[in-house]
Amino acid sequence: MTDFYNSITEALQAMSLVEVVGVITGIAGVWLAARQHIWTWPISVVSVTAYVFVFYDARLYADMGLNAFYIITSFYGWYEWLYGGKGHTERKVTRVGQRELWVMIALVAVFSASLGYFLDNYTDADLSYTDSATTAVSLMAYWMMAKKRLENWLVWLAVDVVYIGVFTYKELYLTALLYFIFLILATMGYLDWKRDMEKEAVSPVTK
């Protein structure tokens, strides 16, 4: 336990300003998402941009590319939350459809295998297949969040557990701690979104 605390202290001393920005805005962005606040998207743009540089330095190229894609998806999610509902109104929380889920799972499997093979054979990437799998599943979760699918939080819970291990291995201890906080926020997000969806279902007003 002492070694862990010492590692955290050393990481805090060695971490770059870019990682500090990524951590702070990352926590803020997920907390806002759990509260369904529209400001989650501009805050998330700042966070994922910072982590493009963090992951480049750590040679986690799949995660670097993932965060670059997040920048684009954040603007899409911003629009969807504001105008993705019926009649271009605010999008409500819904469950993922079975067909939609299986299509995403198939895409995740193909993407993970293809990217993992490429990174393992043509780059100096570390943890190629693990990195690729977490990247693919994270893309799925982020897309689901943009569509306000309730289950996005369950996917994030699974991904966050894996990422904690990956970042601890890469000695990105503060980022590992960040993903532990994400675990808590994802649990809160799932419960809050589920409560809101159930409230909408029993509402006598059709929106």
Image (spheres, rainbow, N blue to C red):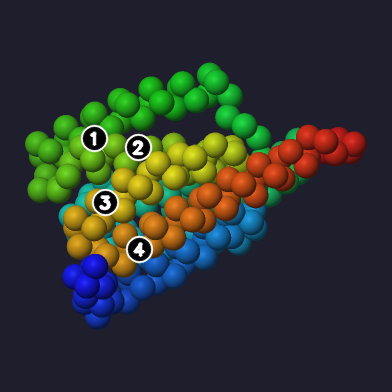
The disc, 3 or 1, on the residue closer to the chain's N-terminal end is 1
Say left or right for 39 vs 62.
Answer: right
Which residue is under mark 4?
177
The C terminus - image quarter = top right
In the image, which disc is placed on residue 85? none
The disc, 4 or 2, on the residue closer to the chain's N-terminal end is 2
Which residue is under mark 1?
115
Task: Give amino acid for label 3.
Answer: Gly
User: Rounded to the nearest whole Å, what is the CA distance between mark 1 and mark 4?
Assistant: 27 Å
User: Rounded to the nearest whole Å, what is the CA distance between mark 3 and mark 2?
Assistant: 17 Å
Q: Few, some or many C-alpha atoms within 10 Å of disc 4 (few <14, some 14-19, many ≥20)?
A: some
Which residue is under mark 3?
165
In the image, which disc is placed on residue 136? 2
* Residue at (44% x, 45% y) in the render: 157
User: Rounded to the nearest whole Å, what is the CA distance between mark 4 and mark 2?
Assistant: 22 Å
Q: Few, some or many C-alpha atoms within 10 Å of disc 2 (few <14, some 14-19, many ≥20)?
A: many
For the residue labelled by badge 4, is the local secondary structure a helix, a strand or a loop?
Answer: helix
Task: Give amino acid for label 2.
Answer: Ala
The disc, 4 or 3, on the residue closer to the chain's N-terminal end is 3
* Residue at (52% x, 61% y) in the render: 29
The N terminus - image quarter = bottom left
